[in-house]
Amino acid sequence: MRKLTCAVLLALAAIPLWAADVTVLTASRIHTMDAARPQVQAMAFDASGKVLDVGDAKEVLTRHPGAKRLDVGSATVVPGLIDAHGHMSGLGWAMLTADLVDTASKAEIVERLRVKEKELKPGEWLIGRGWDQNDWPEKAFPTAADLDAAFPDRPVWLSRIDGHAGWANSAAMRAVKRDLSGDWQPDGGSIRRDDKGQPTGVFIDNAMALVDAAQPAASEATAEKALELGMRAAVEHGLTGVHDAGIPLVELQRYQRLADRGQLPLRVYAMADGNAAALESLCANGLYRHPSGRLQMRAVKLYADGALGSRGAAMLSDYSDDHGNLGLLVMSPEEVAAAVAKAHRCGVQVATHAIGDRGNRIALDAYARELGKDAAGNHRWRIEHAQILSHEDLPRLAQLHVIASMQPTHATSDMPWAEDRVGPQRIVGAYAWRQLRDAGTHLALGSDFPVESVDPRLGLYAAVSRADANGLPAGGWYPDEKLTAFEALRGFTLEAAYAGFAEAEVGSLAAGKRADFVVLAEDPLAVPDAALRTLTVKATYVDGKPVYEAAKP
Amino acid sequence: MRKLTCAVLLALAAIPLWAADVTVLTASRIHTMDAARPQVQAMAFDASGKVLDVGDAKEVLTRHPGAKRLDVGSATVVPGLIDAHGHMSGLGWAMLTADLVDTASKAEIVERLRVKEKELKPGEWLIGRGWDQNDWPEKAFPTAADLDAAFPDRPVWLSRIDGHAGWANSAAMRAVKRDLSGDWQPDGGSIRRDDKGQPTGVFIDNAMALVDAAQPAASEATAEKALELGMRAAVEHGLTGVHDAGIPLVELQRYQRLADRGQLPLRVYAMADGNAAALESLCANGLYRHPSGRLQMRAVKLYADGALGSRGAAMLSDYSDDHGNLGLLVMSPEEVAAAVAKAHRCGVQVATHAIGDRGNRIALDAYARELGKDAAGNHRWRIEHAQILSHEDLPRLAQLHVIASMQPTHATSDMPWAEDRVGPQRIVGAYAWRQLRDAGTHLALGSDFPVESVDPRLGLYAAVSRADANGLPAGGWYPDEKLTAFEALRGFTLEAAYAGFAEAEVGSLAAGKRADFVVLAEDPLAVPDAALRTLTVKATYVDGKPVYEAAKP
């Protein structure tokens, strides 16, 4: 190849540089989520995945002569969807383990487990997740005995739909080194026992760790496989970003290895799990960002309480359907305060799991005390779930500039029994998306996968309908809290980006941002609510490159 | 009739008093708009029209044994709808005059006028309203000559769809005493003239008064008839309240006579028109409330500018489709400030018409200066229309506790040409219901009838769809500004009540409030958006009595 002369270089400078490496995407409509230019028909981006230009097809094409064309015809393009709260390896493991979601009885669960067992080597633990006693005829917690007949020797360990309770058979309990009988309880957890003090097989919240610890460790290859399966499922559903809500340092390192090998198909915004090694690492080494822009850690996930389904959510007064029960604290208020102070000192964003009204108050009190005058600043501290808020606490999120990171599908999963748990007064402050928005709160949306489906279409649908897949209850459950389709989409794009300090980079489509986008066959802002569940994801692009393309029909 | 003894009185006190005069309404669902108890199936109210109780059918019936039953079966009950901005006599006069709405050409207008002329006596003026040159092929203002061939001698006077321009024939112009030719213009108005200085027949804003004044006065009986026609149309569409947006003292007195005779079928919240006799009367005699509770005056309507369609809205910079044109001020900033100060001194609520971004800024500046530290108080000052707001002014309404009184159907009527008028930047702050809500603004909804239809179903539909009757544009025009059905309904009930200091009395259904409600065959919170336009109003109740009942099918 001959050297370019100066004259040739100057001649090249007169035409748009690397014009051939610019792509102009044209579509029936592009919802940019950029308030200044909400709807356009074309977008140009360069080979690095940077958006150069948005506008009318004619003007964009004129400004980029010689660009490659990517015409998606009648399709609609939206910014890449971001799930502000998911558990990637949890999703991957769920895909590797028995799926018990929507099982209607214990008998059906045993049946599914028998199928899954065929994939296992002798002695390997049989793991499942997704059971919910509220879906069974008897609506009571199960016992080890329910599993022992079918699985007398193989350890079986099944987590509840919300991840806040586990169900073990006797073989799994035998593998636990500590004697599980008696009247002791682990901090922030509860071993269910019969009247003779023997464990029944159900372990609530922190008590689950006893059985988890008894499992043989998974191989590194399997752990990577789980992450890869989770990410694959995410991009297939139109996600270009996930906030991984609490991972240990070892998982960050696993992600880092994948990122180094170019194997992250989407952006992962990881939160350090609890006041542990990953937070320590952020304090010691500073906030973390992989050079590819695909992996970050600058947040810590804390846990105020448990979940509502298992009555582990901490309430200010008794459960309406379980008098004397106030729920559980996973971290004490003092532990929360100490972790919050540490994060603040290290410039780390705090995201605290809080479901019950007491859990939320503990988080808000800790934030208020720690932030003081910094509350008006750019801390972007979050509450994860913010599910049940007392009337007095609802406006505090906006006052403290705290982001509500909420999951629309939790409302529609919980609506059959949530009011039983908290009664007609407290339910008015539950899943209160609109009240939080009206108070001025940033609302980032997600799914909490694998607790709920990773599919953001279900979240969009739940947000606008507050109804189940059959559209029931008609008109939606507490319809005053519904969002519009635009607001739901913003929650899964720009607001989720904001919750991850990334709104200058992703979440909307405008010059200077990243070309993360989804091609949908239908316009999510024009279809009837029910059709949001069945939007067709034709392709998912990250940094201007397809990371998922649907098979041609 | 014998006197009641003490014993009899005590015996009566032991049973529910006048139980037979209590009515228990039961329905498939009652959307109370009361956040503490949003959905119930029963409501009890007494003979005076006071709500005693809401709740489950069983509990309410148990608490009111012997009550009359009013079971509306599968129907849905919502609080009576309140139009926060209408013109009652304007609606009535429109019903008495030629309806030119949706005419597609000048020829069609002449045709409709010929039909209407048959009802008139010789020499009587032929009045019409509702033309819009934007709907015609030529899209230019009409002239007197367009009418003169068909009506050489009878005066014809036709107001534009927005009420901000009038079109006269030559006979009507001859009736004006002042010479209309030359180059003079009335304050806040404009006489359109040809290049010879002759009037063309079109009169903008305040110039309309010249032709109005030339008309022979209507009889008092006809004026009452107009009010009655307007109110009748309102209750037939489910309205139990109307804020009459600017009436002279003589009209208040007309309403008072009707109220004295028990002939107000709904609640009228009248605003004194401008800084004139009615405001003077409020200052001299105090805020006015008729003993029936059906008529009030405690507000004054001011006018910052004109309307967008006729380019009379005052803009901070030129119209995008008419360079050099900044629109018109109807009152000067000084006049607005003086009227606002007077209203403040007299404890009168201020409601200022403001359409353009300059009009809105003038109103906000005047409010801010006058209210000072009182801004956080209970003044409930309003901006009527608040149609185009500059980016900096959008948050000021919430900051000043100013209510946005907006008309969803204005957005859908104006959407074909509004962006031409103001361009792609300013349109982002136009009809910005959601941005105003997000900033914390109270949003009272209305129609501005007869500029738009009195039918609040069209307002609900426009609010949730931002689309025309055919659902176009697909997905809605600037869909980020859409409201949910619940928010739209709240805008026409509780928020409109709030804008009239009446939320403790009407706007929601709860014990102690008035039994103003509408019976709908369908559930407005459950139907698809498009079905809001065709909700069936089965009955309208005010103070517990039917003021409209649909004919049985």
Image (tube, coloured by chain):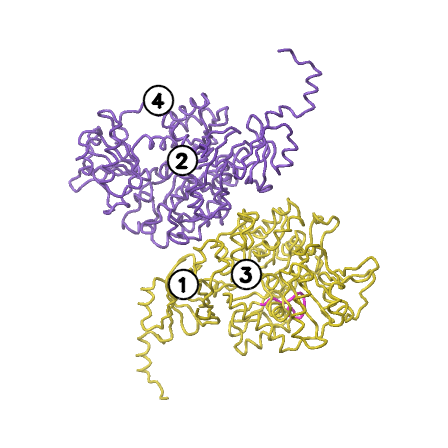
Chain colours: A purple, B yellow
Of the image marks 1 and 3, the number of the one nearer the N terminus? 1
* Tags 1 and 3 both on a single chain: yes
The three-letter amino acid code for the residue at tag 3 is Ala
In the rendered structure, the residue with mark 1 lies on which chain?
B
* Tags 3 and 4 both on a single chain: no
Furthest-left residue in this view: A196
| Magenta residue span | B270-280
Q: Number of marks in the image?
A: 4
Q: Nearer the viewer, mark 3 or mark 2?
A: 2
Q: Is residue B273 magenta?
A: yes
Badge 2 density bin: few <14, some 14–19, many ≥20, Cα 10 Å: many
Residue A221, label in figure: 4
The three-letter amino acid code for the residue at tag 4 is Ala
Going 67% across and 72% down the picture, which residue do you hit?
B117
Residue B499, label in figure: 3
Q: Nearer the viewer, mark 3 or mark 4?
A: 4
Marks 4 & 1, CB-CB < 8 Å contact? no
Q: Which element carries disc 1, helix, strand or loop?
A: loop
Which residue position holds label 2?
Answer: A86
Q: Is residue B285 above or below residue B319?
A: below
